[in-house]
Every structure is written in C-alpha cells, then in structure tokens.
Image (cartoon, rainbow, N blue to C red):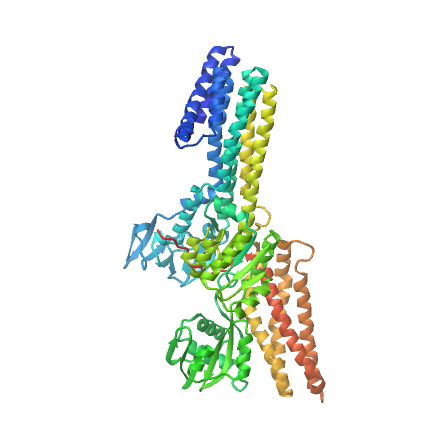
Amino acid sequence: MRHSLLFPWVATALLAGAALFVLGLAGPAHWVWAAAAVPVAAHVALGVGRALAGGGLGVDVIALAAILGALLLGETAAAAVIGLMVAGGEALEAWAEGRATRALSDLMARAPRHAARLIGDGMEEVAVGALRPSDLILVRPGETVPTDGLLQDEAAILDESALTGEPLPARVAAGAALRSGAVNAGGAFRMRATSDAQASTYAAIIRLTQAAAAERPPLARLADRWALAFVGLTAAVALGAWAISGEAARALAVLVVATPCPLILAAPVALIAGVSRAARRGIVVKGGGALERLARTRTVLFDKTGTLTPGRPRLAAVEADPAMGRDEAMRLAASLAQGSTHPVSAALAAAAGERGLRLAAPGAVEERPGGGLSGLVEGQAVALGSEGFLRERGIAAEAAWSAMASVAAGSVAWLAVGGRVAAAFLMADGLRPEAARTVRRLRALGIGRLVMVSGDREGAAAPVGAALRLDAVLAERTPEEKIAAVREECARAPTAMVGDGVNDAPALAAADVGIAMGAQGTAAASEAADVVLTVDRLDRVPEALAIARRSRRVALQAIGLGMGLSGGAMIFAAAGWLSPLAGAVLQEAIDVAAILFALTALWPGTGEAAPGTVPSGAGLRDRMAEHAELRRLVEALRDAGEAVSGGPAALPAIEALRDGLRARLLPHQREEERLLYPAAASLLGGQDPMGALLRMHGAIESLVDRISALLAVARSQDGWASAGPELRRSLFALEALLELHIAAEEEVLAEFTDAASRPVVPVGALRQPA
C-alpha cells in the first residue's frame, strides 16, 4: 500500500510546487518539493538499512545519497524529481512485471473454486478441494474442468488454450481423459474424477508458475553484482568531479544520473516476460534460471518412446503363410488379442477393425505378462507373442522367419496356429509427425549435437536415429546408463534432455535443463524437469529454446541500453553540462526506455511461429483421415506385386486393385490439389512450397496409368509373358512411392491445424505432489 501511495503523492507535490514557483511563490514551492522528496528518502533508507542488516549494500544507496545531497544543497526541485524517479521506477516495475506475468496470472485467476457434484438424483455445489476420485461431476457451459477425469457423456467441446496455447476448441469423445483447467466451450457434460483437485493437471501447473515467478534468475543476480560494482564507480566519478571542479553540484548531478534502475529492473522484467511468453504456448518454465540455462543449451538428448515416437505401437507389416493369407492371419491374431489389454494386442485389434475383418470370440485365453497369450479361436489352438514365448511351447520358427525378425526395425509378434508358425506381425512405433521438423529447427537454432538415449534395443532405435539424422544413437541403456550419458554430454557443452517416462526422470534431473513431455508423460518426469510441455507436441522444444534465447538477449540488450545511456549521462554531468534537475529528468527517461525495451521479450521472435491454421473448407482433417485407407492400398500393392509370380490368374485381383486406385487414390489427390495444397502453400510462403508433393502426385498418376496399360497388354493373346515382369516392377514402384508420399505429406501438413476442429491429442495427467 505504501508503494502505491508514494508515486501519486510525489507526482502531486511536484506539480503543486511547480505551480507555486510559476506564481512567484518560490519559498513555499521549495517547501512543497522538499515534502515530496522526504517520504521517498525515508522509504529508500529503510530498504538500504534492510540490505545492510542482511550483510549487503543496497544499490538504492545512490538514490538515497542523491536525494539527501539535493536537499542539503537546496536543490529541492531536483530532490523531488529524483523522488519521482524512484517512486515511478517502483511503479513502472510493478506494471512491467504485471504485464510480463499476465499469462501466469491468468492461469491462476482461472483456477476453479467450486464444482457441481452429482449425488444420486441430486446435485450439490462443493468446494473444489472437497472433490475425490470417482466423484461424478457436472461441468456446465463456460465452467472450468475442476479436476482430472474421464468424460461420461457422448462428447464434449473443450477450450484448452490455458493449458496448451492452442486457440481452437477441441471435440473429445466418451471415455476421453479430461484435464483440469480446460474450459467447457459447449453444452453441459458429466465427468468421473480420477484425482482430487490438488493432484490435478491445473494445480500442478499453478505450482510450477508460482515457483517460476518466485525464483531470482542468475542473470538478475548477475545484474545485482554489476549494480554493486556500479556503486563504487559512481562514488569515484562523483567525488572526482567534485574534487576537480570544486562544485558539489557536479557530484550531485553524477549521483542523480547514475541511479542504476535499468540494471536492477531490466533483466528480471525481460526474463519474466520470456517465462510468460512460453506459458502462453503451453511451455511451463520453472523460473528465469531455467530459462537462462535453456538459452545456453548447445546439445539436446532425446528419449525415444513417447518423445520422438508416439509410444503407441501400430501394425507396420504382415508376413503370412501364403496358404493362410494376410487377412485370415490378421483375423485370427486379432480375435485372440481381444483377450488382452497389452498395447500390441490393442494395435492388432485396431488394424483388423480398419480392414473390416469380422472377429471371433476367443476362448480359454491365458496371458503371460511380457510374453504373449494363447487360447482357442473357432476351435483352433492359437498362440500370439514373442519368439521366445512360442519356443517355450515347442513351436519353432523356420530359419527364414527368424532371419526376418532379426532385421526388423520394430518388435515382432508371432502367430502360431495348430502348433505351427503362420504369420509374423511387425509392430512399429512410428515417428511423431513433427519429429523431423523439430530436429531441423534445432539445427537451425545452432544446436550442434543431437543424440537419442533409449532403453530400446539397437534394432528398434537405430532406424529412428537414421531417419532423423541424429548425431548418435545410444540404445539399450538402463536409467543409470542414461544418467552417465547425460553427464558425459554436460561435461562437453550445456545440455538439455527431453523425455517423458519414469525411467527418464533421473536423466532429466541430471541434465543442465530437463524438458518433460508433460501432456502424456509421468509425474516423476514432470517433477524432475525444469521445463514441462503441457501440449503433446515435440516442436515446442525448439520454440522454448527460441523464446529463452530471445529473452536472454533482450535482457542483456536492455541492461546495455540503460547502463550505456546512464554512463554517457554521468560523463556529461561530471563535465558540468547537466544540472541536477536536468539529470533527474533524463534518468527518468532512461529508466522508462530500458524497461519498455525489456518488455519486447513478450513479442514472438524467430523460431517461435505457431502452427498455421488452414480454413475449415480446405479439408485437412478429412484428407488425413483418408490416409488409413491409402495405407491399405500400399499393402494391397505389395500383395499384388507378389501375386504376379502366380501367372495370369492374378489378373482379376490386380484389375480390382487398379479400380480401387482410380476410385480412392486419384480423387484424394485431386481434392488435395484443389483446396488443401493452395491453403497450405499460402501459409508456408515461398514460390512453390508444395512443388515436391505435387510432383509425386504426377508420378503416382503416371504409374497408375502405366499399370492400366500393362493390364490391357497382359489380357491380350500371349501378352502376359511381356507384360508380367514390367507389371510387377510397376506395382512395387507405386507401393514405394505411395508410402513415401504419405509420410512426406503428413510431415508437411503436421505444421497446420484445421480451423473447424483441430485433431484431438490423447492426453494424460501432469501431476505433482500437493
């Protein structure tokens, strides 16, 4: 309260004294100006006394000396202006910090305080702190989700901008995980609480932001040390000016312009602005110190599963006994997999559903955790699991099957039917769509070394590192070995570690900067990390780095600007070219300039661009959804190419495939070229950003036309002998090109969100102990 009243008091008294002086009442004017300065001197003296009691010398001693010196020399107007400068500096600092921490304040202001708990047929209003896991809660339109939970109704529309920085509401379906802090942007819905409010996502974020706001960053402490050195320099210049000129007024003028407000205020304001800027993008930085360390990072280490890859296995390929066929093998495997909740089983069941296969109910299912499962499907003995799991049951894979597994880039689930290996399912945890772009952006930001540190086997980790062009891949590392790898990198250069799992927490803590994928990561990782990404996007890592570097750069520039101007003013004052009153006015302008410059850290800088939003009519979501069907066409192309060796009997199946390509693939490409590609190109910029994808479209269409022409030749008399080999080559060429095109297109279009409804990312809970 004292701070808030001091500035208006000094400003009013200064103006009143000026009015009296203009009216010719110089004596009363000097008394009013003195009355303006004395309370400020008392306030500053208290601060200096507290600093001395704490064993330090407060930098405000210069301002105190300037006010007292002005009063002693009868320069009451200058004393009042110095008082205004000090009180105004404090007011300006409070405003600047409020502006810089607005995003953090908004987070805390939106924290829910009450909730509607459903009990039987009734409802009661309760404090959020009274909510417990399993409570049924009604979230009304416009209300904030009070705790983490699961959606009980068919659908809900949520605004998660406070958590993720994404501006568009998301539609989630029944059973979806809900995070506290999201706002209901649709109709009322019911949810089942899975945690109490203190252990929820939003409560954890608030604790992180409070810790961020409370921490004194190293750069701010460095500014304090500079300021203390500046006190000695100021005293030397002021005393020297007095000694040489014999004029005490020159020493006073030096003291007036030397008040180190820019040094004291600019650095923390710029760093807090950076923390605030990051928070608006779904990046919670645990204080200015973490932001500074992130800005100095030169090496980045990544975990693999859940970080560079989504952590959810998907079916990449199927190899089956020709006598059984891929679809039948898939049907039997997925039928048995219904009896398990293992991620591989879920992926097989999902893949069978995409193919429209009718699954049978399994019987007598037995599961060995980490090994596999066995049971009966339509009376047949079926086993699904690792090669070791089958071997324990006396089922050995043939040499060719084992060789395929040894070179597989992912894990292999084996299917045995009737005691014989019938199929192998290659499960891959593909790259995140934004992973390659993240790596390129980090390189562009000057990160010299990128390394993957994973507990996965070499065969699964190496292809990921090769695809992303990482500098090194450290596979099959235990948590202890991960820590050792992190420490080794930290010894070479400032290092950040990005991870999400419990096993990553020690490595995150060991790194100079730990970055946790908090949207789906574990509580242990979020607690150990210095930076927590509350949105499940890896491309927030280079964005966080860009924000940190810009904030640190602005802080240093603001210090340089303020102190450079103050240093120049000190020279002018020592030379007698600045009166104490003029110096006081000039120093006030310098303070304002330095702090306003520090606030520019709130503005977006290079490397911080958010994903663009394409118009809803461009069909981004629809085209991406069609990729699942296109991947089935890729598999059908491979089957058709292999079937060519069977002779002309394969013609009907290949012709049916050709018809499918014309009916599904080519219209898909035309719709992309008509609406989606132009919308994406306008956001990407450049002369022809979609040129490579368009050229692929042309090559794909040419291959479809070539296959059609070859089929016509193959149907002619004696035409199979000449057309068959070329048809096989064309089918395999189209398979490879189409698979490459889908991957390239998804990477480019991962840059964008759909204005109508952005894709919903499954979320987990970011928790910390209460």
Q: Is residue 434 visible?
A: no
Q: Is residue 129 above or below residue 89?
A: below
Q: Residue furthest bottom?
A: 718
- The image quarter containing residue 368 is bottom left
The spot of residue 101 in percent (x, y) is 47, 41
Q: Is residue 255 visible?
A: yes
Q: Is residue 70 above or below residue 48?
A: above
- The image quarter containing residue 561 is top right
Kindly identify the residue that appears in the image at 38 percent across and 79 percent down. 365
The spot of residue 552 in percent (x, y) is 55, 43
Q: Is residue 651 above or below residue 179?
A: below
Which residue occupies the foreground of this view, 243 or 255? Answer: 243
The answer to whether residue 497 is left or right of residue 55 is right
The answer to whether residue 565 is left or right of residue 176 is right
The spot of residue 83 in percent (x, y) is 47, 23
Q: Is residue 533 above or below residue 36?
A: below
The answer to whether residue 369 is left or right of residue 456 is left
